[in-house]
Amino acid sequence: MPTLLGVLTVVFLFVRLVPGDPAQAILGEYATPANLANMRQSLGLDKPLGEQYLTFMGKALRLDFGRSYQTRQSVAQRISDALPYTVSLGLAALFVALIVGIPAGVIASARRNSALDYGVTTAALLGISMPNFWFGMLLIIVFSVQLGWFPITGAGVTEGLAGTLYYLTLPAIALGAAEGGVIMRMTRSAMLETLSQDYVRTARAKGLTPIVVVLRHALRNSLIPVVTIVGLNLGRLIGGTVIIESLFVRPGIGRVMVDAMVARDYPQIQGTVAFFALLVVMINLLVDVSYGLLDPRIRYS
């Protein structure tokens, strides 16, 4: 709760420090001073900042963020409408990161200091160092413009599950590439530490095959730091949807956020940021709970 209150306070102050007038954005550049004053009064922007803050926090604690200045639609309803697109993109990007990062980390640790290890590590560093938007543009140029294999924009809403996954492919790869590199590095490091433990040497002395030693005895204990870094980076992954959804013109929460910032839509900005903050807090809580499932030695009182 203190984290959420802090985030709400920061975002309330931040949106009011950014240059721009919501009333001017709504009425346009030819609005008269009288019309602008009436619009600010109807939006409650003519009141003292402290009064605006108390009103905002009072409603936010009841999960009421008001109505969007742009659409007059409920902020909660607008987030709810866009949520499936952002969740599907986040899960698809996480799937890409896990299915690439964990096997690559295991292979690199099993072939330590080999050419394969150096190649996988270099690929991971490239994935980490490339900005999401730049990698997304590269994918569009190669696979959409040059080869014509994937659509440039859209979400494939009317084309069923197969169409949705088809439209998700490039955005998920663009968003999940950096996270996959981080997971690969963390998996490799954790696996190298685990493979040097006594119980792993005992398993080898029993005559177990290398693949059984790695998958049955080393991998599970190596997943705790990986789960931790995945949980911590999920916030960054979700934040990355703002850029990727704008680049691929997907109607998700990130796109709603960008449109709200351009239009100085205070209620929509505040509600969207609060939703992202709540989501990150819940994800970190789930990560903490998962420790006990991965390692039976960890118990919570």
Image (cartoon, grey):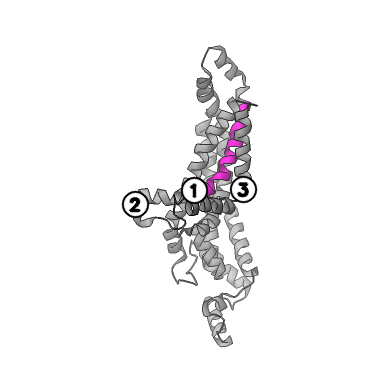
The C terminus, quarter of image: top right
**Location of residue 271 in the rendering, given as x and y in whole percent from the top left corner:** 52, 62
Q: Secondary structure at mark 1?
A: helix
**Which of the pair 10/142 is nearer the observer?**
142
Using the image, tell me which numbered label, if any, was put on residue 172: 1
Return the disc, 3 or 1, that comes first in the chain's sequence: 3
Q: Residue at x 54, y 83 (%)?
A: 38
Range of residues picked out in magenta: 170-193
Instruction: Verify whether residue 182 appears in magenta.
Output: yes
Residue that mark 2 sits on: 160
**Location of residue 264 in the rendering, given as x and y in whole percent from the top left corner:** 56, 70
Task: Determine whether label 3 and label 2 are within 8 Å by CB.
Answer: no
**Which of the pair 187/56 is nearer the observer?**
187
Residue that mark 3 sits on: 130
| Amino acid at circle 2 | Gly
Q: Residue at x 58, y 33 (%)?
A: 187
| Amino acid at circle 1 | Ala
Mark 1–mark 2 Cα distance, whole angstroms, equals 18 Å
Q: Secondary structure at mark 2?
A: helix
